[in-house]
Amino acid sequence: MVGIIIASHGDFANGIFQSAQMIFGEQENVATCTLMPSESPDDLRAKMQAAIDSFDSQDEILFLVDLWSGTPFNQANALIDGHEDKWAIVTGLNLPMLIEAYGARFTMESAQEIAAYVLEPGREGVKVKPESLDPKKAQAEVKESTQTSFKGAIPEGTVIGDGKIKYVLARIDTRLLHGQVATAWTKSVGPNRIIAVSDRVAKDELRKNMIEQAAPPGVKANVVPVSKMAQVDKDTRFGNTKALLLFETPQDALQAIEMGVSIDTLNLGSMAHSKGKVALTKAVSMDKEDVETFEKLLALGVKIDVRKVPSDSPENFANILKRAKAELNM
């Protein structure tokens, strides 16, 4: 696996490393190297060399640093001497770039291939709100609107592909679409559409708009009520759709499955604590209704995969359910 060194002036490297860990989970062969006010360039270079030596392999090394021509860049540039055929440096480090680099290591074995790949996500991560402040973005939207305004809807009954929607992930998560989903899970399972399935959120225009706007590049996000999702599941026009489904509650997931949505595994990401619920893990709390719902799901043959991010090891759901029953006196 490609080794990654995150280097910066001050604690920026440590901070962005922690942020990426919250979203993508713990990573092997990644090290942070910081240049503090009392340290010299030689001190930073020694940290970088020690980090390289600590990796499982020194063949492929990617430096992600804050500024071009700054001390972290200069020291990385000195270390890369003699390794120009395999090692690489990318400057202008931001969180989208780092997350994409983590994800790319699953499929790319070359540091230089990853370096080339993360450039565009790093640039796309720089956005502004309102979008009208970005002239290029505004012009692109006008062009897209002009090009697509005359396209009609696909006629009902049309069969696209094999006419069956593909579910690459179905997840229960109180927060629905957030960083871990928009980056780690999307990168891992490769959907082209994220669908939040919730009667309550579908009626909340503010939250609905926030979810639709939070979709990662190249993926469209929608919010639909459960009954609509059941219709989509049978609609042959979605034959080329790879969908990541998000349920706010296990009750919504059960209702969708009972209405015919073809889900055989549910990823349990988080269930927030509230009055009447007991905390079972750092991310999962349940009440009696939740326990009963999960028992119905299990009776239907649905498997429960308890993980926050793809890199986590699955937790034992049977033990979690057993503990819930004990603490809720069921």
Image (cartoon, rainbow, N blue to C red):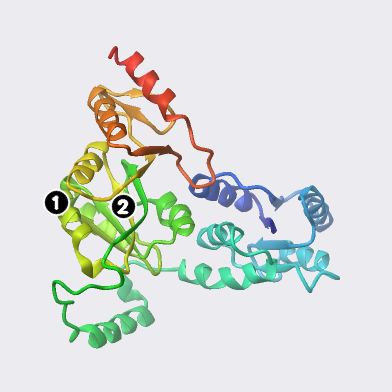
Judge the density around disc 1: few (<14), some (14-19), many (≥20) Cα neighbours within 10 Å. some
Q: Is residue 208 left or right of residue 22?
A: left
Residue, disc 2? 245
Q: Residue type at mark 1: give it.
A: Ser
x then y, percent, for residue 38: 76, 48
Name the one closer to the observer, 73 or 159: 159
Q: What's under tag 2, amino acid-wise?
A: Leu
Q: In this view, does 91 lie above or below 25?
A: below
Q: Is residue 222 left or right of residue 316?
A: left
Looking at the figure, which quarter contains the C terminus? top left
Rate crowding at label 2 as few (under 14), some (14 to 19) or many (20 or more) other CA atoms within 10 Å. Answer: many
The residue drawn where x is 43% and y is 57% is 186
Question: What residue would you read off at disc 1?
Answer: 227
Q: In this view, does 247 lie above or below 235?
A: above
In front of the other: 276 or 162: 162
Position of the N terminus, as image quadrant, is bottom right
Question: Where on the picture, by quarter, is residue 215?
Answer: bottom left
Q: Is residue 250 above or below residue 274?
A: below
Residue 289 lies in quadrant: top left
- The x and y percentages for residue 50 are 81, 49
Nearest the eye: 53 or 194: 194
Which x, y percent locates residue 10? 66, 52
Q: Is mark 1 on a helix, strand or loop?
A: helix
Disc 2 on helix, strand or loop?
A: strand
